[in-house]
Image: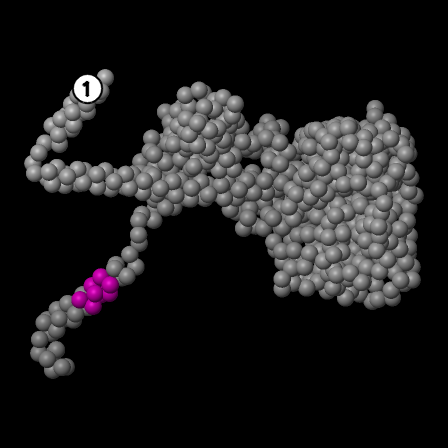
């Protein structure tokens, strides 16, 4: 063996490299089959950040399709329900510059829930078909109602209603949802020396 | 003799406790109306079981507990239900919440109360349900349902019951007064608590600025059971924080994010111990509590045993309120309390103090100055946190860093704000930070559920479409087979022929 290597040093080197190539190629080939990831993991991560309102204001039929579009390079500022916060989180995840919300797709609103004025409902089931999260309960020619805890406030049921009996009302109200807010800061008053607030 | 441990940080604000003359208990006159909020505790609000116009007796159930973490409400005296509506309640928001309003009839007739002579003959679980039905929520300030604390949990055993007679917050003397006036009931209540949770040791901790209360507790305890330890320890704010007191008395630290029960300890306020005693020995639900009314804007500050639901304005009148001298009304003490938006608000199970200071006594906070990074807040923090870091993170709304720096171990005692030379309202930043994180967590739960529902719906819609498509294909295939089966005869022509035949048949019958 040693004598052979001594005799054909170049061939021996080539053979060794080829051998290594075959071995590592086999390992990589095995790993790519054995540890294959299903779906698009980046789209999953993006989908985690999106608010899951399923409103379609971004132009895609739901959050998951938009997440896939972002993973393929679409803009991150098309989600009004998520607002600034979602844009910040997406920018952080994707390591891109955050952009202001694209007004073309709507503006950031207070979270709302749909409310069906039950006396006026004619039981047409159109809103039930429109609801992306099955949050409306009812049957043909019978009154419908919204399961408040499941409603994402997407607005999609408002448009199809032929008698216009669906209102969007603010989700937050009452003492249970009240919480402390950050103290108001007066930038002028908190400036003692000239450089204060210069960095802000 | 129990070894007394020290806690990190802490402050020594002026105590001002003598102002409200601890130990003297007064009874205010009967108020003209009582407003009982349905949510006087942490957990779900109680559900009213009375309607407007109903006559109720003292001790009668007027709202029942909703779910396991909830507390019922009882009528404090006899009278008529005049409203079940929204009224302003003691809350930092100043918002209204559901309440039951009672117009007392002045006779103070009560339902028949059935106490238990020998509680040791009963199962602990039966005593827990007595405590639950008596509407007891922790009376130290947070208002956690006591029965939930007492319920046995798998894999956890309690070996020590601590009665927290610290009352470290300035001005407040409600616990001091109850320890001086009802020491026997506190000790008996503590014994009942120990029996319920199966604890061997009972420790009653009293700060050394309350020598009279300490002596009263010691005498009462030695007269009942020699093994009960009554311990005095140096005064420092906030020694009365549950986790702080546990460290002082046992040297053990409650783990971050954990509960005292994780290290085998149950901690209760003396008022709660008395309420437990009353509920078990006398069958009396919680309808009264001791409230300290203090501050220099009162002519007659003191401790009042008031019915729950008594309007604060009524108590203030009894204490000689001079509104023109008062700068704001505070529910609770000067460190952890919150300003009330009006005096037309009832007292509830957690109201230990109403403070009416003058402007000179408790000046309006000066505007906050920039943080100079002096680090005094970190020295004062009893939870060994880094208040300054938390302040920067809260301002930057950096929730991840706030959590990593253990924001949720902050007990909101206000020691950091008190020492801050720039008068930064640090606690408010932490409260806002906690609220933001909690909201984000709730949002996460919501969005996860929405995603699951959306995906389930997508799947169903696709499945239904596929089924329809399959049926259509099936019908098409069947039609084709039929067409082929009838020897090339055109099915359309056949149908027309059939229709014609039927029409002719109809015409012939006419």
Magenta-drawn stretch contains B274? no
Q: Quadrant of residue B416?
A: top right
Chain label for disc 1: B
A62 or B502: nearer the viewer: B502
Residue plotted at (86% across, 27% down)? B322
Q: Position of residue B25 (x, y in %)?
A: 91, 42
Query: Dot 1 lies on which element?
Result: helix
Task: Count neighbours of disc 1 (C-alpha within 10 A) and say few if under 14, some if 14 to 19, many if 20 or more.
Answer: few
The image shows a total of numbered marks equal to: 1
Residue tagged by mark 1? Answer: B508
Q: Main secondary structure of the magenta part?
A: helix
Q: Position of residue B391 (x, y in %)?
A: 59, 42
Magenta-drawn stretch contains A26? yes
Residue plotted at (16% across, 27% down)? B498
Q: Quadrant of residue B188?
A: bottom right
- Horizontal relation, residue B161 to residue A102: left or right: right
Residue A136 visible (yes or no): yes
Against A167, is A134 above or below? below
Residue plotted at (18% across, 65% down)? A21
B506 or B304: nearer the viewer: B506
- Region rendered in magenta: A22-30
Residue at the extreme left of the image, as rendered: B488
Residue plotted at (17% across, 37% down)? B479
Q: Position of residue B510 (x, y in %)?
A: 23, 17
Q: Position of residue B263 (x, y in %)?
A: 67, 62
Quarter of the image that includes the N terminus of chain B: bottom right
B34 or A135: nearer the viewer: A135
Residue B316 visible (yes or no): no
């Amino acid at each position: 063996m040693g004598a052979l290597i001594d005799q054909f040093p170049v061939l021996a080197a080539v053979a060794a490299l080829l051998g290594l190539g075959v071995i590592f190629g086999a390992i990589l080939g095995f790993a790519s089959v054995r540890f294959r990831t299903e779906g698009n993991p980046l789209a999953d991560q993006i989908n985690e950040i999106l608010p899951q309102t399923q409103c379609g204001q971004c132009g895609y039929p739901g959050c998951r399709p938009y997440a896939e579009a972002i993973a393929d390079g679409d803009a991150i500022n098309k989600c009004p329900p998520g607002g600034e916060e979602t844009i910040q989180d997406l920018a952080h995840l994707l390591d891109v510059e955050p952009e202001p919300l694209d007004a073309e797709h709507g503006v950031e609103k207070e979270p709302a829930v749909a409310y069906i004025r039950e006396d006026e409902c004619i039981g047409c089931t159109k809103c039930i078909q429109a609801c992306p999260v099955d949050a409306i309960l009812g049957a043909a020619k019978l009154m419908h109602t919204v399961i408040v805890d499941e409603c994402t406030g997407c607005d999609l049921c408002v448009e199809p209603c032929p008698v216009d009996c669906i209102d969007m009302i603010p989700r937050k109200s009452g003492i249970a949802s009240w919480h402390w807010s950050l103290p108001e800061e007066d930038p002028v008053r908190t400036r003692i020396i000239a450089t204060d607030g210069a960095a802000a | 003799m129990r070894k007394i441990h020290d806690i990190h940080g802490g402050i020594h604000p002026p105590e001002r406790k003598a102002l409200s003359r601890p130990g003297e208990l007064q009874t205010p006159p009967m108020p003209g109306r009582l407003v009982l909020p349905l949510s006087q505790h942490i957990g779900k609000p109680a559900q009213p079981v009375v309607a407007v116009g109903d006559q109720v007796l003292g001790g009668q159930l007027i709202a029942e507990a909703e779910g396991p973490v909830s507390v019922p409400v009882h009528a404090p005296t006899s009278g008529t239900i005049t409203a079940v509506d929204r009224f302003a309640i003691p809350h930092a928001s100043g918002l209204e919440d559901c309440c039951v309003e009672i117009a007392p009839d002045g006779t103070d007739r009560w339902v028949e109360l059935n106490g238990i002579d020998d509680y040791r003959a009963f199962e602990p679980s039966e005593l827990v349900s007595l405590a639950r039905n008596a509407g007891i929520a922790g009376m130290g300030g947070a208002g956690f349902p006591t029965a939930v604390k007492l319920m046995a949990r798998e894999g956890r055993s309690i070996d020590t019951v601590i009665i927290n007679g610290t009352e470290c917050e300035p001005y407040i003397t409600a616990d001091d007064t109850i320890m001086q006036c009802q020491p026997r009931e506190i000790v008996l209540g503590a014994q009942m608590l120990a029996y319920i949770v199966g604890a061997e040791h009972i420790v009653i901790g009293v700060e050394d600025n309350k020598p009279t209360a300490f002596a009263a507790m010691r005498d009462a305890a030695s007269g009942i059971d020699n093994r009960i330890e009554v311990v005095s320890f140096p005064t420092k704010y906030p020694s009365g924080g549950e986790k702080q007191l546990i460290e002082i008395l046992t040297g053990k630290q409650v783990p971050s994010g954990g509960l005292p029960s994780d290290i085998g300890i149950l901690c209760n306020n003396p008022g709660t111990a008395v309420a437990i005693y009353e509920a078990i020995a006398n069958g009396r639900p919680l309808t009264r509590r001791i409230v300290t009314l203090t501050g220099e804007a009162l002519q007659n500050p003191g401790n009042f045993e008031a019915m729950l639901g008594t309007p604060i304005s009524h108590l203030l009148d009894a204490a000689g309120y001079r509104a023109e001298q008062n700068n704001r009304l505070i529910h609770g003490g000067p460190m952890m309390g919150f300003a009330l938006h009006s005096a037309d608000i009832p007292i509830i199970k957690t109201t230990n103090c109403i403070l009416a200071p003058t402007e000179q006594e408790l000046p309006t906070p000066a505007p906050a100055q920039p943080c100079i990074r002096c680090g005094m807040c970190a020295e004062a923090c009893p939870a060994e946190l880094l208040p300054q870091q938390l302040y920067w993170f809260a301002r930057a709304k950096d929730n991840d860093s706030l959590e990593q720096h253990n924001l949720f171990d902050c007990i909101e005692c206000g020691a950091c704000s008190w020492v801050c030379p720039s008068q930064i309202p640090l606690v408010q930043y932490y409260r806002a930070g906690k609220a933001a994180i909690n909201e984000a967590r709730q949002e996460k739960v919501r969005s996860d559920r929405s995603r699951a529902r959306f995906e389930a719906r997508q799947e169903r819609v696709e499945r239904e479409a596929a089924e329809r498509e399959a049926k259509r294909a099936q019908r098409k295939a069947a039609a084709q087979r039929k067409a082929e089966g009838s020897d090339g005869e055109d099915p359309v022509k056949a149908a027309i022929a059939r229709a014609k035949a039927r029409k002719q048949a109809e015409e012939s019958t006419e």
